[in-house]
Image: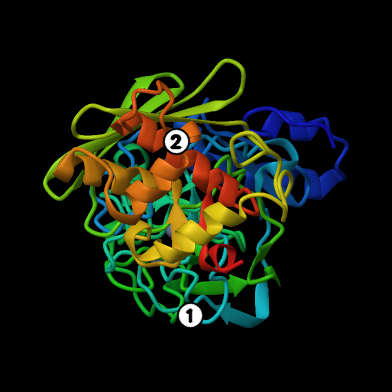
Amino acid sequence: MKKLSALGVSALAVAGVAGLTQSEAAKRSAQIAKSFAPFAPGVKTRADESKFYVESDGMPEHELMSGIVAWQQQVALPQNYAGTNAWSIPLFPKPAVNPLSAKDHFFRGAIAIAANGVPIFNPIKNDGRTDTLIAGELDKFGGHSGRGDDYHYHIAPLHLQAKLGNDLPVAYALDGYAIFGYLCSGGSTPKDLDSFNGHTTKDRGYHYHASKTYPYLNGGFHGEVVEAGGQVDPQPFAQPVRPALPPLRGAKVTTFRRLGEKSWSLGYELNGKTHFVNYSLMSDGNYRFEFVSPDGSKMVETYRPGQRRPGGGPGGGRRGGGGGEERAFFATNHEFFDANHNHEISLHEVDQQIRSVFANTGQLSGAIGRFAASHAASFDFDKSGKIDLQEALDGFRAALHHADLNHDHSLSGAEWKQ
Ligand SMILES: [Zn+2]
Ligand SMILES: [Zn+2]
């Protein structure tokens, strides 16, 4: 079926859906659309005879990421939740014969879609144990970005009630049932909630409620969903443009600013000093990341969507062959470079460690210095006989790239042992 217009109602009437179903589908779709309409035009909706679709770029209007104290170095990038990659929920939810709990299912992907087009994931993250809110992983709106720099919530987005009020759902679970705030019809306290935070009332039928403690929103699916690969299927996919990074221990995200329509700045504090990640979507479709250190020095990386790393396709490029000497060097010195001890040396870690060496002593020394000195051709660019900070950064970044077998922009224990 071709794409239908914003609210799906008038278009549905001409879509050739049979009699009664047509009007019921149109009525139901108009009802669901009420929650999403206040967030147009950023959020678009449409419907066919059985499903309601939500399109968005997943970037809400509010401040993002600020307040996170357990940060995995992601930022929030616009996603393409549109067309065949739109969110979809059943127009007419059906109670499941065996309702599935989110306590032991659906640790991957979204379980609901918020009225502002932002997906909502299981409050328990994919290790099956960690409560993301309690762990400090969420910003003050209950969201953060995943490994693909895809922003999502993990609790009910009650801040949306500023636009929606108490009587409209703040989200829809992917089984098609609505998720309301803390209060039921007429401002009453919801009664007899089941283990999924749901109950049935005369005017609303079955629906879920938000709660201040776990499960925070639908704690599973009262309705039918298809589970595949640990997630509700089908659902849209995020498109990562850069490799996932390890957690940055001790960092706190403090600021988020929109520098332009497609340009953002995230600030974080580490050891009492402020760093920034400034990033933008450029007119050529590439993403430019600028990592600004407290001393004002910058490191720039550019990513092309679909490649996930600078200068090579996924799994492509160098395999075996070169880089053995560099891998041996990183294997010997992995304790120095792997600052967060996750058995992975990221480009960012290399950068930070080299900077800290220069901050402390003003020059390279020890095994690190010997490696650079014995590779003077690739370190001492200006042939001054000395290796300055910029030369050291460039040289060790290049060494990491040479050592990196799978071109994922970081060196794993498995790689440096080869
Ligand atoms: Zn998450
Ligand atoms: Zn209720």
Q: Tell me which residue sits at (66%, 43%) in the image.
A: 86
Kindly identify the amino acid type of the residue bearing the numbered disc 1: Lys
Q: Tell me which residue sits at (33%, 54%) in the image.
A: 142
Determine whether the residue tagged by mark 2 lies in a helix, strand or loop: helix
Kindly identify the amino acid type of the residue bearing the numbered disc 2: Ala
Please name whichever residue, 203 or 195, is drawn nearer the observer in this view of the structure.
Answer: 195
Q: Please give the label number shown on residue 376.
A: 2
Image position, residue 400 (x, y; %): 51, 47
> Label 1 to label 2, Cα distance in Å?
56 Å
Image position, residue 147 (x, y; %): 50, 53
Please name whichever residue, 338 or 75, is drawn nearer the observer in this view of the structure.
Answer: 338
The color scheme shown is rainbow
Cβ atoms at labels 1 and 2 below 8 Å apart: no
Image position, residue 354 (x, y; %): 31, 44
Q: For residue 230, which quarter of the picture?
A: bottom right
Residue 71's place in the image compared with 94, above or below, is: above
Q: Please give the label number shown on residue 103.
A: 1
Numbered label tally: 2
Label 1 packing within 10 angstroms: few (<14), some (14-19), many (20+): some
Label 2 packing within 10 angstroms: few (<14), some (14-19), many (20+): some
Image position, residue 194 (x, y; %): 44, 80
Please name whichever residue, 313 or 266, is drawn nearer the observer in this view of the structure.
Answer: 313
